[in-house]
Image (cartoon, rainbow, N blue to C red):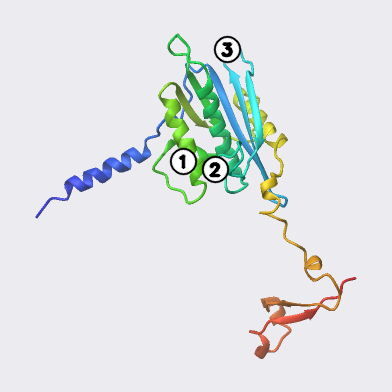
């Protein structure tokens, strides 16, 4: 009878690898800059989402670069990165993609040890999706795939850490100030993309759907309405005449 130990050992190895992050999750002491990413989304119509990116050097503490923009759903747009919905998760993943592209565009220095960055995000979802490649998700697959590819590319020439930080903190620390600045950038440039105006319209009201008096609307019999009806009418829908005043 063949032994099952090799297969069991392989399962243990795969489980261990799945728990090991691809980049450090704690700040690197030799970092030359801190990169803050954040998102902003509207959960009510008209739906919109934005992203913000802010780079701060360690010594001296200055802001050499900051950027922001809306999440785009148009596949033919130059600002499209794979988002299919306007949510906080797509905004944060877009900000991380732009952060990796900015790091990739920086010139390679001649001295060793000066290409170290600490990337801060307040999204636990994005943090786990990038640090643990074996984490599977049914949404935002194209965004996550592009972010992972860029992370793998910048790992070859730079050292970086992706750190989760608390959002909307009242602290006056440098991390809290950087996170608030990135959040303000995301909120500032959040707007409704043209691609969404026809894809995600606000639902019409009952008055708009019917439009005039004398129309009839049907409601299912709820538990509250059943109290005033005989038992024989419990399973039937109720029809009311609408009077628009």
Residue name at image x 45 percent, y 9 percent: 110
Residue lying furthest right: 245
Q: For the residue carrying disc 2, how many other residues have a C-alpha within 10 Å: few (<14), some (14-19), or many (20+)?
A: many
- Which numbered circle lies on residue 59? 3
Total numbered circles: 3
Q: Position of residue 178 (x, y in %)?
A: 63, 26
Q: Position of residue 61 (x, y in %)?
A: 62, 15
Q: Is 81 drawn above or below residue 219 in the view shown?
A: above
Between the C-alphas of marks 1 and 2, the distance is 9 Å
Q: Quadrant of residue 71?
A: top right
The residue where tag 2 is placed is: 82
- Look at discs 3 and 1 and give the one toward the viewer: 1
Q: Is any atom of residue 128 visible in this view?
A: no
| Labels 3 and 1: the sequence-earlier one | 3
User: Horizontal and vertical percent for residue 137?
Assistant: 46, 48
Front-most of residues 175 and 115? 115
- Provide the secondary structure element on which disc 1 rests: helix
Instruction: Estimate the x, y position of residue 173 in percent, counting from the top left.
Output: 62, 24
Measure the alpha-carbon separation of dots 3 and 1: 34 Å
Label 1 near label 3: C-beta < 8 Å? no
Residue 223 against residue 131 in the figure, above or below:
below
Q: Is residue 207 left or right of residue 173?
A: right
Mark 1 lies on residue: 145
Q: In the rendered image, which quarter contains the C terminus?
A: bottom right
Label 1 packing within 10 angstroms: few (<14), some (14-19), many (20+): some
Tell me the crowding category of disc 3: few under 14, some 14 to 19, or many 20 or more residues within 10 angstroms, Cα based.
few
From the viewer's perspective, is 210 left or right of 105?
right
Q: Residue at x 50, y 44 (%)?
A: 142
* Residue contact between numbered discs 1 and 2, judged by CB atoms under 8 Å: yes
Q: Quadrant of residue 155?
A: top left
């Amino acid at each position: 009878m063949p032994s099952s130990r090799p297969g069991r050992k392989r399962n243990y190895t795969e489980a261990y690898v799945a728990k090991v992050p691809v980049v450090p999750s704690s700040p690197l002491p030799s970092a030359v800059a801190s990169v803050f990413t954040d998102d902003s989304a509207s959960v009510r119509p008209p739906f919109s989402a934005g992203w913000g990116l802010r780079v701060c050097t360690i010594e001296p503490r200055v802001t050499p670069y900051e950027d922001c923009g809306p999440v785009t759903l148009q596949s033919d747009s130059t600002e499209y990165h794979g988002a299919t919905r306007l949510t906080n998760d797509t905004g944060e993943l877009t900000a991380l993609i732009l952060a990796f592209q900015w790091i990739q565009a920086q010139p390679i220095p001649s001295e060793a040890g000066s290409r170290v960055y600490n990337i801060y995000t307040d999204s636990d979802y994005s943090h786990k999706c990038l640090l643990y490649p074996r984490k599977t998700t049914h949404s935002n697959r194209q965004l996550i795939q592009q972010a992972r590819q860029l992370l793998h590319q910048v790992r070859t020439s730079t050292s970086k850490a992706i750190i989760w930080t608390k959002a909307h903190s009242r602290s006056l620390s440098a991390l809290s100030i950087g996170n608030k600045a990135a959040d303000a950038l995301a909120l500032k440039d959040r707007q409704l993309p043209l691609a969404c105006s026809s894809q995600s319209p606000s639902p019409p009201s009952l008055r708009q759907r019917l439009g005039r008096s004398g129309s009839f609307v049907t409601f299912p019999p709820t538990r509250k309405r059943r109290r005033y009806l005989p038992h024989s009418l419990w399973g039937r829908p109720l029809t009311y005449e609408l009077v628009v005043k």
